[in-house]
Amino acid sequence: MARLGEGDNRWIVREREDGRNCNNWHWTTKDVSKNTKQWLAEKLKEASFPSPLELCKIQSAEVTGEASLTNRKGRTFLMYELEVKLKWEAELRDSDGTCLQSCTGSMKLPDVNATMLDDLDVEFSSSTREGTLVTAMRKQGVSFIRKLVEKVITELQEEMRAQQNSPATGARPPSATNPQPIPMPLKVESTSKAATAPAAIAAPQSAPPAAAATDKEDDAEDKDDDEAPPPPLAAALKALKKSPEQQKSVQLSNCSIGDCHLKPLVEALHHSQCAVETLDLAFNRLTDAGVHLLFQAIVSGCAMELTHLY
């Protein structure tokens, strides 16, 4: 690390006069609750149920909660905590159009968030308890609503991510008024022995600070290696060692996990019976070096069942 005031100007982050967040690098949060709730409610009202529920429709859809669009280092996330309440009515008719059965009811999805999106809880109620129509609505109708909510949220997130990263709002091409980048330093090779002599004499004078800096870095690395893993990571490691075949999802987001904590995690994921399919390490203290280490482990055969990495 360079001393104060001696760093390379190319890596110094300064406030821009035009207020632009180049390449969406800095942390930003935007409230999108109104648009998210309105979009989800409209899509649910327009839902067309599959056979034999073609005559079923959503009478009303109420969505409450909060949603925000978060950006950091060019990555965009839709964060949301929503609750969905639906009222439905359905009919079952014969080929002549005669109504054989009819009923009404409601569905409630109390916890719609990113963690539960692929396995949403649905509270189902109907005006009648028995009948072909109620049974089909309880099984096929509930499954259809689950998949529809997941599809709408996923599409909305991709659309917002595309808008955030589009040239109009995100990484715009530099204009003529933008400051020119600082040129890369050129490597100058000396052509005479006389020019190299002063450098050789001055080298021993600068050696002690370099050695001291190296010792400090080594001490810092040793300190990081001795740092105990955070409690959530320790619990996950214990579960992975005790019953690796039962651990399908490992949720470790926002747990203050650093690069020094990855080694025991990689060792646990290398278990021959490891069945982890989802690994969430978002919003931690991992650097590029730590991410590179994790990717190398995955490529080498770690966590063979892994399909989702956050």
Image: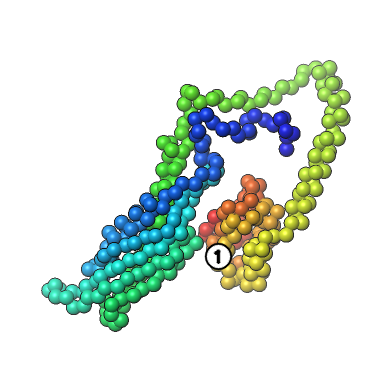
Q: Position of residue 172 (x, y in %)?
A: 46, 33
Q: Residue furthest left?
A: 96
Residue sitting nearer the eye, 300 or 225: 225
Residue 281 showing in the rendered view: no
Residue located at (87% from left, 24% from top): 201
| Residue type, mark 1 in image | Ser
Residue sitting nearer the eye, 306 or 56: 56
- The kind of secondary structure element at disc 1 is strand
What number of labels is visible?
Answer: 1
Query: Relative to 262, is 237 above or below?
Result: below
Q: Position of residue 101 (x, y in %)?
A: 21, 77
Residue located at (83% from left, 39% from top): 212
Q: Position of residue 161 (x, y in %)?
A: 44, 46
Residue located at (41% from left, 47% from top): 160
Question: Is 235 left or right of 80, judged from the image as shown?
Answer: right
User: Disc 1 designates what residue?
Assistant: 249
Using the rendered view, name the quadrant where residue 209 is placed: top right
Query: Relative to 276, is 175 above or below?
Result: above
Using the rendered view, name the quadrant where residue 256 is placed: bottom right
Query: In which quadrant will I find the N terminus?
Result: top right
Using the rendered view, name the quadrant where residue 187 is placed: top right
Residue located at (46% from left, 38% from top): 170
Query: In which quadrant will I find the C terminus?
Result: bottom right
Q: Position of residue 62 (x, y in %)?
A: 34, 61
Question: Is 37 left or right of 298, judged from the image as shown?
Answer: left
Question: Is 214 left or right of 166, judged from the image as shown?
Answer: right
Q: Residue furthest bottom?
A: 130
Query: Relative to 190, is 206 above or below?
Result: below
Mark 1 crowdedness (10 Å alpha carbons): few <14, some 14-19, many ≥20: some
Residue 217 showing in the rendered view: yes
Question: Is 10 left or right of 70, judged from the image as shown?
Answer: right
